[in-house]
Amino acid sequence: MVAKASDDDPEKARRFREAALPYLDDAYTLARFLLRDAADAEDAVQECYLRAYKHFDSYRGPAMKPWLFAILRNVCRAEYARRKTAPVTAVDDKPETVEQTPMWNEAPETPESHLMRRFDGDTVRKLIAALAEPFRETFVLREIQNLSYREIADVAAVPVGTVMSRLARARAMLRSAWLAEQEHVK
Amino acid sequence: MNCEEAEVLLHALLDGELDAGHAREVEAHVAGCAHCAALMKDYREMSAALADANLHYKAPLELRKRIEKSLPQPVATPSRRSLLRGFAMGSAVSAMAATGLIAVVLRNDDTQRIQSEVVSAHLRSLQAGHLTDVISTDQHTVKPWFNGKLDVSPPVIDLTSQGFTLIGGRLDYVDTRAIGAVVYKRRQHVINLFVAQTASTERQAAKISTLQGFNIRRWSDHGMNYWAVSDLGADELSEFGDKFETAMKANKEG
């Protein structure tokens, strides 16, 4: 772990603090959902802020939050690669595969709608944590971080169309898990 | 449009990401398809439930300190008195003061204090179940309600057709006086628009800032100060402000 940012410019540091530190909770939240581990999330966020500070001179916008998230996401992916327990790429996310997978295979085919029960935060987090990458990432960026599709596309470095299909699948999977959880706790 | 397409596009519809033409197509499909209509309702409820469950984590103080320490320190150390003033503002704000926002507090004390007050007022309105004193989606009901309660009643503009639903109005208390709050919603996100009279009639362009995780868009026009506060992203809050200002202008001209 790098202990100190190399560039000793107080004015730059001040601008960086004002611009980036308000998003610390958001960044930590994203890291928790991406890495599903508190200690790893802390390390990733710290690394993210160091990298962001280093590249802050070249930051031209558009918005600080997606810019930070793009860096954080790369840090988290490096962490994934490092882990021996990295996901065995169970999910094929190539566009053609996504298109061939009809959405309704993932949700019970029922014409009537359900009453979606309110769950506490821990239960919802558990359900989201069970989503596979990269659906979890897209879902969290949209539903918890409130990014627009364009911003998510920039953060995840994929076309907007992929964001749409990932989000549709993520929600379909979460809905199934949600309904199953409702059955389970009934 | 078939179900397969609709099942992807209805998400974009829910998220307000579709252009008008596609939105109409999806709506037309959903209107005639029980399956897709049921899905849409489920997703809408799920989004509401997600917004209700607080899923945000708070960064540990240790992490904040570590990041602070790794950055070059500012040249001027704030005086003891100003630090204390920062801490007197409440724990959430002082936590931010400790992370560098104190520079903002020091340079622009008054603006910052009022911003912190409008954010507190926004939080109160969400927590106490006291979002609105008058509940109505009709501007012609909300506007007269303010009459007689305030020196100047705030402009109430219906932006429902533009994606921001008017849900009512409320009296609030900011900077030791009563001010009007007009309440809007986008998806599950509440926007409080605080309006206060000001001596200056000069127009001040909008500024976006963030405090305690909320975005604030502040501007002045025709002798009124405006603060729009929400957990919406800065881009959507800007959109709200732009639409409000455009509608105000249209009202004045028309």
Image (tube, rainbow, N blue to C red):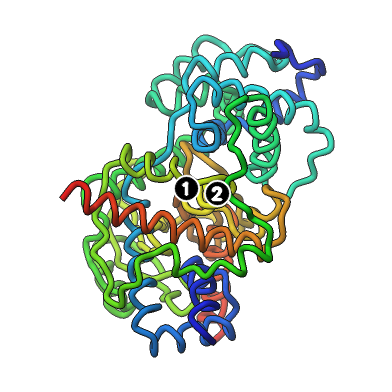
With B106 as the anchor, is A120 left or right in this view? Answer: left
Residue B50 place in picture, x, y as percent: 36, 51
Name the residue: 27% across, 56% down.
Answer: B131
Name the residue: 49% across, 68% down.
Answer: A103
Specify the amino acid type for callout 2.
Leu
With respect to residue A155, does B94 lie above or below?
Answer: above
Dot 2 surroundings within 10 Å: few (below 14), some, or many (20 or more)?
many
Asked if labels 2 and 1 touch by Cβ distance under 8 angstroms, the answer is yes
Specify the amino acid type for callout 1.
Ile
With A109 as the anchor, is B130 left or right in this view? Answer: left
Name the residue: 58% across, 82% down.
Answer: B22
In front of the other: B252 or A116:
A116
Q: Which residue is mark 2?
A: A141
Residue A159 is tagged as none
Circle 2 — which element?
Answer: helix
Q: Which residue is mark 1?
A: A144
Instruction: Give the letter of the chain under mark 2.
Output: A
